[in-house]
Image (cartoon, rainbow, N blue to C red):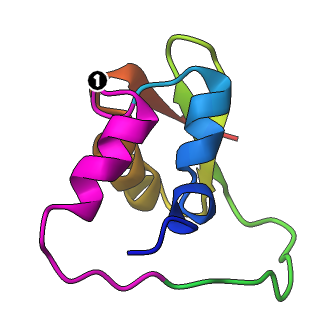
Amino acid sequence: MPDEDYEREGFAYFEEQGLLIRGRIPRTAFAEWKHEGGLYYVLDFRLVSITPGVQKWQVRSKKTGVVCHTSTSAEGAARWSDRFLGEHGEVVKE
């Protein structure tokens, strides 16, 4: 995993916001992720279109109220929150 993934995968954002990832500072969480030894695929996406009327769900930090992630499904938002914020995240309808 290249060091550029620190920013591309959102760890730099968490650091800038003073947020923890599963109770760890972002640099530590990224280092642990890099050294887990698993095989990971990182996909880059680009916005193609926005469909009006689609429900959106936000993942927010309970500590700061900062929106960290947006999803079109409650389940996707919950998985993201569990993975990156644990008990410090909440999922709300936008």
Against 34, residue 50 (above or below) is below
Against 89, residue 9 (above or below) is below
Q: Which residues are magenta?
A: 21-42
Instruction: Give x and y (percent) for residue 39.
Output: 20, 83
Q: Quadrant of the N terminus?
A: bottom left
Which residue is at a point 61% across and 65% down the rendered structure image?
A: 8
Tell me if 51 is positioned left or right of 80 in this view: right
Specify the amino acid type for callout 1: Gly
Instruction: Give x and y (percent) for residue 53.
Output: 81, 65
Mark 1 neighbour density, 10 Å: few (under 14) some (14–19) many (20 or more): some
Residue that label 1 marks: 23
Q: Nearer the viewer, residue 19 or 66?
A: 19
Tell me if 82 is positioned left or right of 38 in this view: right
Q: Nearer the viewer, residue 57 or 1?
A: 1
Instruction: Give x and y (percent) for residue 72.
Output: 60, 63
Q: Quadrant of the C terminus?
A: top right
